[in-house]
Amino acid sequence: MKNLLLILAAAIALSLHSPAQAYGQFGHETIARIAMANVSPQVRAKVLALLAQSSALATPGCKARTIEQISVWPDCVRGMGPRFSYTASWHYQNVDICQPFDLKNACRDGNCVSAQIDRAVKLLKDKTVPTAERVQALAFLVHFTGDLHMPLHAGDHRDLGGNQVKAAYGIYAPDRLNLHSIWDGALAERAITDGPPLVRPYSAADTTATQAGTTEDWSREAWAVSRDVAYPSAVGDQPCTTPTPTRAKLDTATITRLVPIARLQVERAGLRLARLLDEALR
């Protein structure tokens, strides 16, 4: 039991991230791999050709030579100070779960994750755009499609997407752990590793319904998961009328119930990213 606790503590410590990181490295890499397994061969070749030109980004400390590296590049460059600080608000959209869905106010001037996904697709489609900007657009598209599907980057309860809700994950409850970081890290990692591999070619029957819709549709869907699942699992069935507890607790039964939902969000992100890449680079 002691060894198990140490392993769990180490895994969660590695997955504690700043407010603008969703799914952590493992989640973003998994989403990118799902997409690459489901794009057309022609588009896969174009993605690899762009990755081969990633030196144009001039970020040697944040590599982008592989789909895995580029999937986390937007988080990496946030540590470079003023050069990329303007992108901080692009990783999320705080849409109040206790009000009617309103993406417009959350995306003023395009400074939100869904608007930046749409922008990245447009830049990738335009072959007159300089190489460095197209590679950067690829990085943002891959990363932000993952971010959009993390429920606590889409729904908010005036608590920075759950960052201000301290929470326990099963028996593990360090002061640094909160509702947001749980969905970012430990829960996402368990969801990805529970069950059959998510990284595989999916059939047309599997993908057609999942890939349908727009970024606004996907935003509303993730917001609903935040409203109906993520917050109630931690603060009670009526999160808009129930005072937030000093420390929320996701017990073992709750975690088990959340795993399929978190897993579905990762799968949706990967398949929808494949669609967006096909549209942008065909």
Image (cartoon, rainbow, N blue to C red):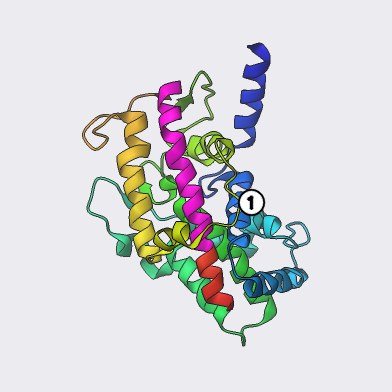
Element type at marker 1?
A: helix
Residue 108 against residue 246 in the figure, above or below: below
Residue 186, percent from left and from top:
55, 34
Question: In percent of the image, x 53 and y 62: which residue is there?
Answer: 273
Residue that badge 1 annotates = 29
Quadrant of the snapshot with the N terminus: top right
Q: Is residue 102 left or right of residue 2?
A: left
Locate residue 55: give its quadrant.
Answer: bottom right
Q: Residue furthest top?
A: 1
From the viewer's perspective, tell me whether residue 95 is left or right of residue 57: left
Residue lying farthest to the bottom in this orientation:
128
How many numbered marks does the figure carry?
Answer: 1
Q: Where the C terminus falls, by quadrant?
A: bottom right
Q: Position of residue 257 (x, y in %)?
A: 41, 31
Residue 124 rendering spot, x and y as whole percentages = 58, 77
Q: x%, y% of residue 24? A: 59, 45
Is residue 254 or residue 166 the one in the foreground?
254
Residue at the image position 29 percent from the left and 29 percent from the top: 236
- The residue drawn where x is 27% and y is 35% is 239
Q: Is residue 8 visible?
A: yes
Left/right of residue 207 with respect to residue 185 in the rendered view = left
| Dominant SS type (magenta) | helix
Determine the residue positioned at 63% across, 73% down.
43
Asked if 21 appears above or below 218 in the picture, the reply is: above
- Eyeballing the image, is 211 above or below 258? below
Region of the chain picked out in magenta, as a range: 251-273
- Residue 87 is inside the magenta segment: no
In reply to whether residue 260 is colored magenta, the answer given is yes
Whether residue 179 is visible? no
Residue closer to the observer: 160 or 262: 262
Three-letter code, disc 1: Glu
Badge 1, how many Cα within 10 Å: few under 14, some, many 20+?
Answer: many
